[in-house]
Amino acid sequence: GIPCVSYENVADINDYEQIIYLGGLYAGGVKGLKNTFSLLKKSNIKTIVVTVGIADVSNKENTDKIKVSLEKQLGDDIYKNSLIFHLRGGIDYGKLNFMH
Ligand SMILES: Cc1cc2nc3c(=O)[nH]c(=O)nc-3n(C[C@H](O)[C@H](O)[C@H](O)COP(=O)(O)O)c2cc1C
């Protein structure tokens, strides 16, 4: 029953009482995360952030680096109120284009 919306189609992030944000890591940051959360006015909202990236997430050095980046993207208050999970994704090299 939880609505699933692309970050590009979120009209007003303040309309949600709980946010679960899943996003791919691109050059160290989660795609769309900073812009999406920059519009959030409440800092006490319960947030779950799930990162998906190619790096080995059983390696604490890697997840520590991702967390540093998340803190910068989310800001201190939202970061502190967030539950963070890391998933390992993949790269389909055949689908990469010039932009990638
Ligand atoms: C241009 C580019 C940059 C990437 N940068 C990172 C990165 O900094 N850290 C990481 O763990 N994975 C990185 N990846 C891997 C992606 O996070 C991984 O492919 C992920 O599964 C993408 O999810 P999506 O296809 O749902 O966007 C990168 C992939 C591409 C194509």
Image (cartoon, grey):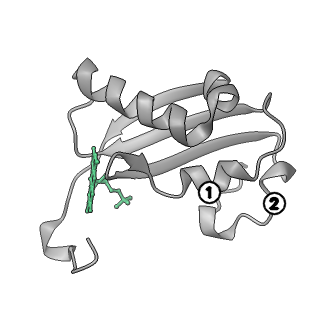
Q: Is residue 91 above or below residue 50?
A: below
Q: Quadrant of the C terminus?
A: bottom left
Total marks placed: 2
| Residue sitting farthest toward the bottom | 98
Question: Which kind of residue does numbered mark 1 sit on?
Answer: Asn
Question: Which kind of residue does numbered mark 2 sit on?
Answer: Asp
Question: What residue sits 35% from the left and 23% below the top?
Answer: 64
Q: Dividing the image into four quarters, tell me where ligand 1 lies.
A: bottom left
Q: Which residue is mark 2?
A: 12
Question: What residue sits 71% from the left and 55% below the top?
Answer: 3
Q: Which residue is mark 1?
A: 35
Q: Residues within 10 Å of mark 1 (few under 14, many from 20)?
A: few
- Residue 80 coordinates in the image, percent (x, y): 63, 21
Left or right: 96 in relation to 50: left
Q: Nearer the viewer, residue 68 or 4?
A: 68
Left or right: 69 in relation to 26: right
Q: Nearer the viewer, residue 13 or 2?
A: 13
User: Dividing the picture into quarters, in which one does residue 6 lie?
Assistant: bottom right
Question: What residue sits 62% from the left and 42% below the top?
Answer: 20
- Residue 41 coordinates in the image, percent (x, y): 83, 44
Q: Residues within 10 Å of mark 2 (few under 14, many from 20)?
A: few
- Residue 78 coordinates in the image, percent (x, y): 68, 31
| Residue sitting farthest toward the left | 94
**Nearest-to-viewer mark from 2 and 1:** 1
Cα–Cα gap, marks 2 and 1: 12 Å
Asked which secondary structure carries label 2, the reply is loop
Label drawn at residue 69: none
